[in-house]
Amino acid sequence: MSLEPFQKDWDIVELCDEILADPTTDIETLRATLQDAQKSYVKVLKRADKLVRVSDRTDLRLRDASARIKKQQEELEKAHEELASHADRLEIEVAARTADLKMERTKLAKLVELGIAMAGERDEARLLSLVLEGALELTNADGATFYLTTDDERELRFKILYNRTLGTSLVDSPETPIPIPNVALYSDDGDQPNLKNVVSYSVNCRETINIQDAYDSADYDFSGTKRFDEANGYRSTSFLTVPLIPRGGDVLGALQLINATDPETGDVVPFDDELQGFVEALAALGAVTIDNQKLLTAQRNLMDSFIELIAGAIDAKSPYTGGHCNRVPEIAMMLVREAHDSTEGPFANFAFHSEDEWREFRIGAWLHDCGKVTTPEFVVDKATKLETIYNRIHEVRTRFEVLLRDQEIERLTQRLESLGGTGLSEAEREEILAPLREKFSFVADTNIGGEFLNDAAISKLNEIGAARWTRHFDDRLGLSGEELRRMASTPVETLPTEETLLADKELHRTPREPGTAAHYAARGFKVNVPDNERNDGELYNLSIARGTLTDEERFKINDHIVQTIVMLENLPLPKHMRRIPEYAGTHHETMIGTGYPKKLMRDELSVPARVMAIADVFEALTASDRPYKKAKTLSEALKIMGFMCKDRHIDPELFELFLQSGVHQKYADEYLDPSQVDAVDTEGLIVIAQEMSAKFVENDGVNA
């Protein structure tokens, strides 16, 4: 509203005041002025009244606005109070959720911890115990039972039974079986699954069963549980049964938890659904680990069986060495066990620290002769000097028969050319036969190889072998291509031709491939490689001074150790089995570098490697199934080993342990024929071993 009209009225009032104050003002002027002032006053009143009315309306609007502001303020205060209350509730909810997350994190951490522990555990009972302990801790359950399926998968057997309240903790084992009948997975009259028992139902249907109160459940038969409760003064209430199912595999069993308890009050409560998920995860983790362990065990058993099969096949290949591959590991394990158990003396610091190390040695012992699969059977079993695939003495005997007939024919021909006659008399025939019989007998006795053949005997052998006989048939007919190649340098003879009774021919020799010696040396084998792969020469073989083997055959026999090492080193052996080639391939080494095939010294041979040498020697000396020697008695075998100890061929400290521990006697009582087990001068042999041990110490292992 403009104030300009009020300003004019105010000017009139001021003018009136001036006129009235002036005494000279006339009446008319005064009257006119008062009239104007009255008019202005009326106008002012009117305007003032209007202004009051406007002010009243403004005041009313202000009061309305104030009321609205007050209402809004009240609403804001109420909203603030509600927001504060919501914030409090949110804070409480966040704290609760944080506590839940912390608990879940703790449980997840426990699962991870258990998973790591289970991954490194190989013992089945301990592995199951870890799962059970973890489930009890996660759920605060009072009891738990582990069931595993039987081999035929028709029953569940109790593996672990635990109850905190009753103080029960049982683990099934062959020595201490749990005395509770198995739970049938199928009906007695067929293959219908047993769905009455909660555990068999869980396994058959492959699902988790969560029961709040067994006494209120009509779905399963808890009569046995109730009888148990009555007999033990117990109350089985809540049950959680989880099947053990590895990923993509068959059910292995079930984990059943009993009576979850409130950690604050100790009251029995149902198993929480969220905790059920953790238990299922734990059971699945345990099932996978158990399944992996079963697979590893099956693979290990398969490998062990395959190794024993190889060893058995090697023994079966030669009836004369039958049982050697089986018996050597027995001796080796006995002796290495004694070294392992020693708490003083030279083996106080020796030990196998894990089952893997024991198994590694055992496999090495089983495979110590696996290279014999490459050794020809006729060499392994060579019982006479002329034996190859068959005993060639039969050929020689046939030639003697030919000589006899040749001489008979010659005598008869002479008689017919003379005045005539009726034939040879018995005396004349005996005159021819006797020297031939004596010579053949000598050759046949020589072929046996039982005694040392001296120079005089070899000279006589050459003299007998120089006898001539006539061959009328081509000796190149019926031969293989390889035999013909070996005869290529031999001139073709005009028939009939004379040959010596005993001969060393090109046909008898099989040259070795060039570079063989260099190949052996490149692999670290220090061996003398003969020029020929084989030499079947008759005089060459019959002239063997001792035994029945030629140098070539002895190399082939010894080569089984080289082949053992090569075969085993070519296998992709895991880290915990990489010493198998060492254990299997060093049993012919000596303590002074004269052994085979690497000429290693004592300090280059581990304790297990030296054990193998003693085991191999002792078994070979006491074996009663060799074609070339008589079975030695226990005392004879140990006496020879005493000489080998003096010659530093076997380790004196282990030989002493072998005797003091009684391993020799334990083995003899179990494996030797009673006629072989006689009295042994153990004390005298121990003295020899101790003397040699002292010399090794004085000379730092070098031959004195």
Image: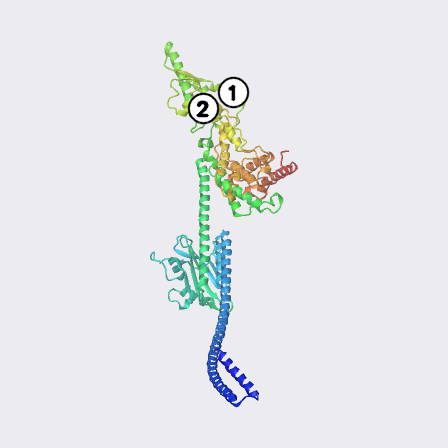
Is 573 located above or below residue 99 in the figure?
A: above
Is 305 located above or below residue 438 in the figure?
A: below
Horizontal side, residue 506 vs residue 18: left or right: left
Horizontal side, residue 472 vs residue 125: left or right: left
Residue 290 position, x and y percent, is 45, 53
The type of residue carrying mark 1 is Ser
Asked whether residue 616 appears in the rendered view, the answer is yes
- The residue pinned by badge 1 equals 459
Q: Please tell me which residue lies in front, 414 or 703.
A: 703
Toward which corner of the image does residue 241 lie, by quadrant?
bottom left
Q: Please tell me which residue lies in front, 257 or 276.
A: 276
Residue 137 position, x and y percent, is 50, 61
Label 2: element kind:
helix
Q: Quadrant of the C terminus?
A: top right
Give me the residue at 41% from left, 60% from top: 208
The type of residue carrying mark 2 is His
Give me the residue at 44% from left, 49% from top: 295
Residue 111 position, x and y percent, is 49, 57
Q: For the residues marked 1 and 2, what is the alpha-carbon distance in whole angstroms?
A: 21 Å
- The residue pinned by badge 2 equals 508
Q: Earlier in the sequence, mark 1 or mark 2?
A: 1
Q: Are marks 1 and 2 in contact (CB under 8 Å)?
A: no
Furthest-right residue in this view: 698
Is 50 located above or below residue 554 in the figure?
A: below
